[in-house]
Image: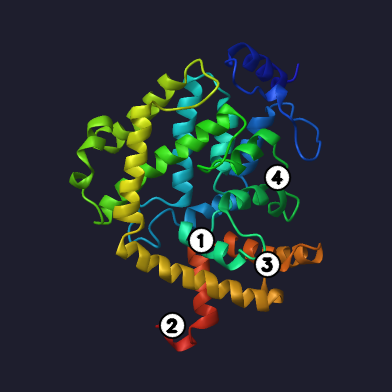
Amino acid sequence: MELRILQEERESRLLGAFAVSSANTKGRLKEEKKCDIRTDFQRDRDRIIHCKSFRRMKHKTQVFISPEGDHYRTRLTHTLEVSQIARSIARALNLNEDLTEAIALGHDLGHTPFGHAGERQLERLCKEYGGFAHNEQSLRVVDRLEKDGKGLNLTWEVRNGILNHRTEGFPETLEGKVVQLSDKIAYTNHDIDDAVRAGMLHLEEIPQEITEVIGNTSSNRINEMIRDTIYNSMDKNDICMSAKMHTCLKELRSFMFKQVYASPAAQEEHRKAEKIVSDLYEYYYEHLDLMEGEFLQLLLEGEPQWKVVCDYIACMTDRFAVSTFNRLFIPNELNRS
């Protein structure tokens, strides 16, 4: 008997009533022969880990643009923290941990350089055509852009979780809902750590009504949020926090937006990032032939010009975007200095 079938049978015995078993996937965009060793969700996880977009996240901004120091989060380390939190919750609730992990690892593949500042600028530039959102771009990456236009051909459940991981999304699996909440838990907590490291925030500034609920260390905050989520989601066809913890997380996010994300120092860096993204977009929109071959192939296949330029910019890492901007717009003598 194939090892995959043994694993699927194990899932049927161990998974909870509201979990998605690998054997019951709604399938892939294109039908293909199943792996004899791995379940479909394990296979999706592996495809994501080995794709180029996953590797590029190590050089993409999480919050702080080009920080000086080795210990600030990147888009990749954020993704790994989301995965760890999500797997802890999924395992405790007897959900499909492989499906949860695949969604978590793939949820930010389409993120732009310079974090949400880059995303907002691409949205402004493309609003009249159809706009830009990183969750939709993440789905486009796995469906269309990876493997030289062939895509990763992931399962419906993983694709649905990736598309709907943002606050306004509605994942159709509990595993997707776990990732959606784990994303908030992860970035709210690690952004505090990075803001303290950057000197933009002191722990004593966090309101007392928040610290009384979740403590004032990174491990305490994460543990309390995970525990609360697990105990309030048991035996439910939903993933939720208690009203008290939900309010606490909402207040903490509001505090972080005011103190860190929208601070004058952050806004100045965002302005620079938006300038780079805008200039690169406009340049390549007028010089399509200078994009790399795989993007030219998309144009030949009938993809809209604005969409392909968005693809090209969104795929860039921070450092590649900066170096390209310098090469295109900064005189050589100044660039060398």
Whether residue 130 sits left or right of residue 187 in the image: it is right
Q: Quadrant of residue 81?
A: top left
Q: Residues within 10 Å of mark 2 (few under 14, many from 20)?
A: few
Residue hosting label 2 = 336
Q: Tell me the distance, in whole angstroms, between the alpha carbons under discs 4 and 3.
A: 23 Å
Looking at the rendering, in which quadrant would you find the N terminus?
Answer: top right
Which of 141 and 181 lies nearest the eye of the viewer? 181
- Tell which tag, 3 or 2, sits nearer the viewer: 3
Quadrant in which the C terminus appears = bottom left
Q: Residue at label 4?
A: 152
**What SS does tag 3 mark?**
helix
Report the side of 299 relative to 336 (left or right).
right
Contact, mark 2 vs mark 4 (Cβ under 8 Å): no
User: Looking at the picture, how far across and down is residue 265, in whole percent?
Assistant: 31, 64
The residue identified by callout 1 is: 120
Instruction: Answer with mark 4 or mark 1, whichever residue precedes in sequence.
Output: 1
Pointer 3 or 2: first along the chain: 3
Above or below — where is 79 with respect to 172?
below
> 259 above or below 300?
above
> Which secondary structure, mark 2?
helix
Name the disc covering residue 306, or none: 3
Tag of residue 97: none
**Mark 1 is on which residue type?**
Arg
Left or right: where 89 falls relative to 268: right
Q: Residues within 10 Å of mark 4 (few under 14, many from 20)?
A: some
Rendering colour mode: rainbow
* Cα separation between marks 3 and 2: 32 Å
Q: Is residue 189 visible?
A: no
C-alpha gap between disc 1 and disc 3: 16 Å
The residue closer to the viewer here, 178 or 318, is 178
